[in-house]
Amino acid sequence: MIVYKIQDHFVLDIPDVNGGKNFELLSLSRSWFLLQRYEKYAYKPFITEMNFDYIIEGEF
């Protein structure tokens, strides 16, 4: 059996909002960035986790 565990966190970094991607033009991106970075909010990033189990059958 092969087990995959994949995790991702949705965090905006400075290059995301200041790297010519135009994300900084969206009010949602600016709000999201402030929510994550402003210490008084103490926001924790949203984490996505995916788990996959694959059973391998046959002869090798």
Image: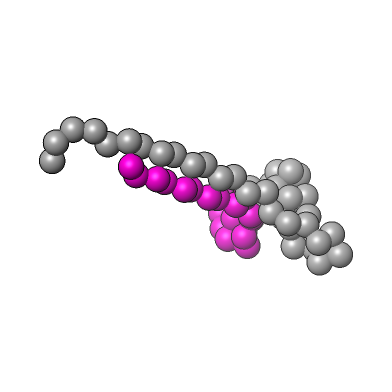
Lateral position of residue 19 relative to residue 44, left or right: left
Q: How far across and down, in percent of the image, does residue 3 sit?
A: 40, 45
Query: Which of 19 and 32 lies nearest the eye of the viewer?
Result: 32
Residue 15 among magenta residues: yes
Question: Can residue 1 be seen here?
Answer: yes
Q: Using the image, determine if residue 16 lies above or below residue 48.
A: below
x 75%, y 44%: residue: 27
Question: Can residue 22 be seen here?
Answer: no
Lateral position of residue 30 relative to residue 5, left or right: right
Residue at the limit of the structure toward the left, as seen here: 60
- Which region of the structure is painted magenta? 1-21
Which of the colour schemes (rainbow, by chain, secondary structure, one colour) is used?
one colour
Asked where in the image residue 2 lies, by quadrant, the reply is: top left
Residue 5 among magenta residues: yes
Query: Which of 7 and 21 lies nearest the eye of the viewer?
Result: 7
So how many labels did they put on this image?
A: 0
Residue at the limit of the structure toward the bottom, as seen here: 39
Quadrant where the image shows the N terminus: top left
Q: How far across and down, in percent of the image, does residue 9 sit?
A: 60, 52
x 24%, y 33%: residue: 57
Residue at the limit of the structure toward the top, as seen here: 58
x 74%, y 62%: residue: 37
Q: How far across and down, in percent of the image, does residue 15 sit?
A: 58, 60
Query: Which of 10 and 14 lies nearest the eye of the viewer?
Result: 10
Quadrant where the image shows the C terminus: top left
Lateral position of residue 52 relative to residue 14, left or right: left
Asked where in the image residue 26 lies, by quadrant, the reply is: top right
x 36%, y 37%: residue: 54
Q: How far across and down, in percent of the image, does residue 35 sit?
A: 78, 55
